[in-house]
Image (cartoon, coloured by chain):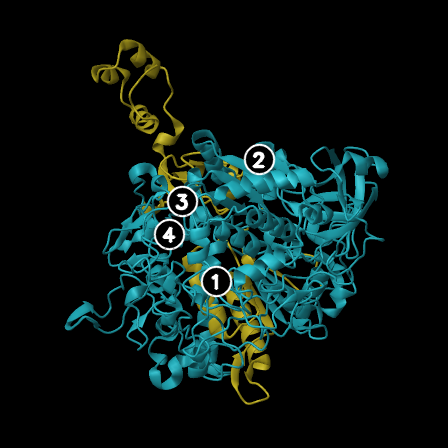
Amino acid sequence: MNMDLSRRSFLKLTGAGVAATSLGAMGFGEAEAAEVAHVRPFKLTTTTETRNTCPYCSVACGIILYSKGDLRKGDKAEIVHVEGDVDHPTNRGTLCPKGAALKDFVKSPTRLKYPMLRKPGSDKFERISWDQAFDRIARLMKDDRDANFVAKNAAGVQVNRWATTGMLAASATTNETAWATFKFAKGLGIVGFDNQARV
Amino acid sequence: MTNAWTDIKNTDLVVVMGGNAAEAHPCGFKWVTEAKAHRGAKLIVVDPRYTRTASVSDYYAPIRQGSDIAFLNGVMKYCIDNGKVQWEYMKAFTNASYIVKDGFGYKDGLFTGYDENKRDYDKSTWDYVMDDDGFAVTDPTLQHPRCVWNLLKEHLAPYTPELVEQVCGTPKEKFLKVAEMISECSSPTKTMTSMYALGWTQHSKGSQNIRAMAMLQLILGNIGVRGGGMNALRGHSNIQGLTDLGLMSHLLTGYLTMPTEKDVDFTTYMSTRLFKPLRPGQTSYWQNYKKFMVSFQKAMWGDAARADNDWAFNYIPKLDVPAYDILRMFELMHQGKVNGYICQGFNPVLAFPNRNKNVASLSKLKWLVTMDPLETETSRFWENHGEFNDVDTKSIQTEVIQLPTTCFAEEEGSLTNSGRWLQWHWAGGSPPGEAQHDTYIIAQIFLRMRELYRKEGGAFPDPILNMSWDYADPNEPTPEELAKEINGRALTDLMDPTDPTKVQVAAGKQVVNFSQLRDDGSTMAGCWIYSGAFNEQGNNMARRDNHDPDETGAYLGWTFAWPLNRRTLYNRASADLNGKAWDPTRKIIEWDGTKWSGYDVPDIAPNAKPQDVGPFIMNQEGVSRLFARGMMRDGPFPAHMEPFESPVENVFNRKMRGNPVARVFKTDADQLGTSDEFPYAATSYRLTEHFHYWTKHNRVNSALQPEFFVEISEELAKEKKIENGGWVRVWSKRGSVKAKALVTKRIRPLICDGKPVHIVGIPLHWGFTGSAKKGFGPNSLAAFVGDANIETPESKAFLVNIEPSTAPKDKEASV
């Protein structure tokens, strides 16, 4: 087949249910039209496409997420396929063995779904609510900060340091999440604050 | 990266040393393939293992891990001895001509000023001779015996091909072939790119490894040019971004630095950050520090940061040590001095060296909070998995709260890649179960703490109560709101400095970029280097114009690169002293008699005359530094140092161990092994089928590489009676692992300092959660010691022993 249509626009056409006869009417030869006629509608044509980037290494390849349902319309959206973004200057549609299996990360059986608590000495996690988790964490943090905050050093200089609670920040979160996290951690006076770049 | 992934196609020679791009960064590595196919570029790989990158190289040379400085110093010496220097570039764009103070010297593996008890240098002689006006004295003829160039030649003198062979185990003829190929890139019309990763950083002298290559690139004239540069292949998708945004103990945003206890007030803090030019007429861009710092304080605390309260300088904690880096924090934890810890998308049980110490440390916490889309070994460190995690669950009194977060596919925002491109992405799927965005989680904890401080009072509540949290829904700031805050805006009408009757930026409007930031409190910006990413033109990170005029690889319309959408750092150095491109076929910018322009955003003031203003505008000198003054703790020149655990002695000083100024905690010093007990040199690495500890949760990747193994040579296998595919035990002074043995030809014994050195390769992708088989990783064995300048752990070089073994036992299932 030698059709002067890009792969993606071709798929759109066929998936949109354009009949083989109308393709013929658009100037394709009968052979091509017959070929198209027996191709089953492409599975991705009814999906929503979203531009994203691979979360693994720092090449940051462009990817397209294909989902059933459109988040922007307020739907619940389920990702059914991930592939390389052909328009991306770096990867031009290609992906490595990690990027090509990204859907398996999204759908991993060990994705976490609920806040969990492991009590001291226990051998299991127990489900808790978000409110329970947030209230407990805020309480634990405030109590430790109030008990161990160093306001001044021996020379009387204000140092306003909290060293008994630390935080490790992720290296695959967005810059915007990072900025919110920065404000939170440095604003509380946490000095034991690092990200993966240290390692 | 100084350059971009897409720029690699412009190179003539790729040197991969301290990395393995074909496996760890496969789609970026395709630009190497492109350069080979279309430019006839060559690829050199120098690595202890014959990696997949090596398998497509034009030339491969083996090297013992941890000996890179000796190799690179040897190459520099070769280039200088053979006149293979980009002379005009080196003379004009480096500090080669600067005169160094009397007293500075190097002897027996140590620079002047060493104090063995403090494990530190008195660096007072490591500096330039200054004239009465405070400018550095130079000798442009390079005749002065104390000029940097002559001191460098003296420093490099011992690094002969014979010494390189003795230290690195690289056969002399292989070293010479590599040196000869590299030296050809001293031509103004030939460029070389350096691609490196954790193979250089994870050493007790990692910073000096990178410095050595940067110096070589400067001598060859390869910085700031197309197809050149120092290209750090960052590991995680936003490790660059989190560092740029200052999520590190010693940093604030945009490489502003945390105050120390010496900075008793804002004036004192600023007094050490004035960055006066060290040569007449130089830019020394950090002179603008105060504008960025005041705008940062305004972004953090809004109206509570005022001129009359030192811009709320007290709200920022003051450090009493250089940094509370991860090694220090886990040491403090181990001593019982840390009560709580939050791990956001981070798995220290597998990521930090000396796992036994780390698990013991976490066991002493009162509470641990983890935030992650996946199970991690850290959130389950208390769970017994037989030999895979042999802990006494009952005795661990740590309360653990595990919070489920969204992953990349379910969130929106920008990530900064190695090439400094801030690429915006959009959410395509709904989160599973009750998983939440990190921004929501952080906001919820913050708001609850703020409420508790409002109600109860407590220790210094001011920075919490006054924190700028001005979001439409305080419960969850949106990515757009946060991005706009990072970019910065005018807080009052900003009048045009050249015409005070005109408003340059109206109050409330986004600044166009950091050039509009001010030090009088009239602007705010979360991170000055990102300013320009989201201005009144809109979200520049969301741009997706992939046009590339004349196919230079710049892609200026694709997303946004910091700073100022500049794609190649130091690009003014791509042109000679008259402003003409060194290589007309690789022009980036040129001087037209009145201004700079070209394919990229000039890295110089657009009207700065080429003869007057140096290209390295962030440096006080205006030039780059072959001699680093006192800015590196372990020396102004890179010098050979052995790893703390090395199979051989340091040939410069046989009593010296590791990096003489690297910090070593007492308990860790006691846990350093020696080569008589642990004769084999181990190193860690990644596989192309896996990403760190994430993809073992994916079925596809777990099927591709299901099981932990260690890689050894046929020679070592024979000596230790180890069978390919058989079980082995590998142990260090700190821990023990069991693995399948992979006996290969990819690793060969090296002869170093007259004796054979066997290398053991240990990939890092296994743990006790996920879909793959349970296993271990190199950090069960690696030493708890870091780089002298930045404290990155020395995970790439440590000593082990090995023997045939049986399979590890999991916890028996309870009935």
Tell which subunit mark 3 falls on.
Answer: B
Q: Position of residue B435 (x, y in %)?
A: 49, 53
Tell which subunit mark 1 falls on.
Answer: B
Q: Which mark is residue B571?
A: 4
The answer for how far apart the CA atoms under marks 3 and 1 are is 26 Å
Are the residues flagged by discs 2 and 3 in contact, CB closer than 8 Å?
no
Same chain shared by disc 2 and disc 1: yes
Q: Name the secondary structure under disc 1.
A: loop
Q: What residue would you read off at disc 1?
A: B97
Same chain shared by disc 1 and disc 4: yes
- Residue nearest the viewer, comparing B576 with B8: B576
Q: What residue would you read off at disc 2?
A: B700
Please tell me whether mark 3 or mark 1 is closer to you in this view.
1
What is the crowding at mark 4: few (fewer than 14 residues within 10 Å), some, or many (at least 20)? many
Identified by mark 3, the residue type is Arg
Q: Which mark is residue B226?
A: 3
Residue found 74% across the figure and 43% down from its top: B759
The answer for how far apart the CA atoms under marks 2 and 3 are is 38 Å
Q: Colour of chain B?
A: cyan
Are the residues flagged by discs 2 and 1 in contact, CB closer than 8 Å?
no
Q: In terms of sequence position, does the residue under pointer 2 or pointer 3 come before the other?
A: 3
Q: Which mark is residue B221?
A: none
Identified by mark 1, the residue type is Ser
- Residue nearest the viewer, comparing B123 with B361: B123
Q: In terms of sequence position, does the residue under pointer 4 or pointer 2 come before the other?
A: 4
Q: From the viewer's perspective, is B2 left or right of B605? A: right
Q: Position of residue B751 (x, y in %)?
A: 76, 43
Q: Name the secondary structure under disc 2.
A: helix
